[in-house]
Each structure stands twice: as structure tokens, then as C-alpha cells.
Amino acid sequence: MINFESPIYDNPNKHYTQVKAIFDVSGNITPVSMTYDGEEFEIDKIIDIRPAASLRSGGAGIRYTCYVDGKQTYLFLEETKWFFELVQ
């Protein structure tokens, strides 16, 4: 049997989250909101999208540099899961 669950490592910098996103006809993915601590936050602005590795928390994928609630945040799409890091 195939197990689609991957281990979630306990890393204080890697916060898995729910994301609402728009998928356009060209296949582009644009996140519009994310959930943190049970509260949904709108993504104010996306300033950069690129493939990147997360050096602080491990993992790699598409990195969205964005502003959420006035704070710059890295939001990663890692295969099928979303996680974020606060930019220090």
C-alpha cells in the first residue's frame, strides 16, 4: 500500500499551514490567504516567486515572498504542503 503521509519534523521555524490559492488556466498558483493559529489572514502583496530552498527550516519548493498582516513572510509550496517562515 502506498503511504502518502510524509513525516513532519519538529522544527520551530517551519510552520505548516492551510492556504487558499487561485489556479489560473496557465497553471500558475497564487496564494490569497493563509491560516495561522486558527485565524485566516489575507496575503496583502506578493513581491517575488521563485524555486528556492529554505535554509532556516529545511525543505525546498516554490517560495513566495509576500506580506501578511504587514509583515514580510516566506510562504513555501513544498510538493503538496504549504509552510511559512517569518523573515527576520
Image: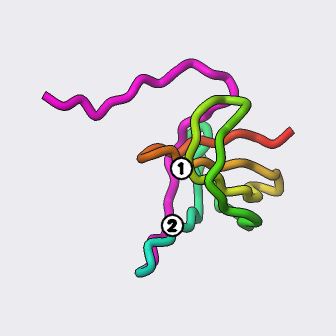
Magenta span: helix, strand or loop, mainly? loop
**In the rendered image, which residue does mark 1 sit on?**
77
Magenta residues span 1-24
Q: Is residue 52 above or below residue 45?
A: above
Circle nearer the N terminus (2, 1): 2
Dot 1 amino acid type: Leu
Q: Are marks 2 and 1 in contact (CB under 8 Å)?
A: yes
In the picture, measured across the screen, residue 42 lies left or right of residue 81, that is right
Q: Residue 42, how many percent across, how many down?
A: 65, 61
Q: Name the residue at the top extreme.
A: 10
* Residue found 44% across the figure and 46% down from its top: 79
**In the rendered image, which residue does mark 2 sit on?**
29
Q: Disc 2 to disc 1, how far (Cα)?
A: 10 Å
In the picture, measured across the screen, residue 70 lies left or right of residue 31, that is right
In the picture, measured across the screen, residue 13 lies left or right of residue 72, that is left
**Label 2: few (<14), some (14–19) or many (≥20) C-alpha neighbours in 10 Å:** few
Q: Name the residue at the left extreme.
A: 1
Residue 35 forms part of the magenta stretch: no
Q: Residue 44, how many percent across, how many down?
A: 73, 65
Label 1: which secondary element: strand
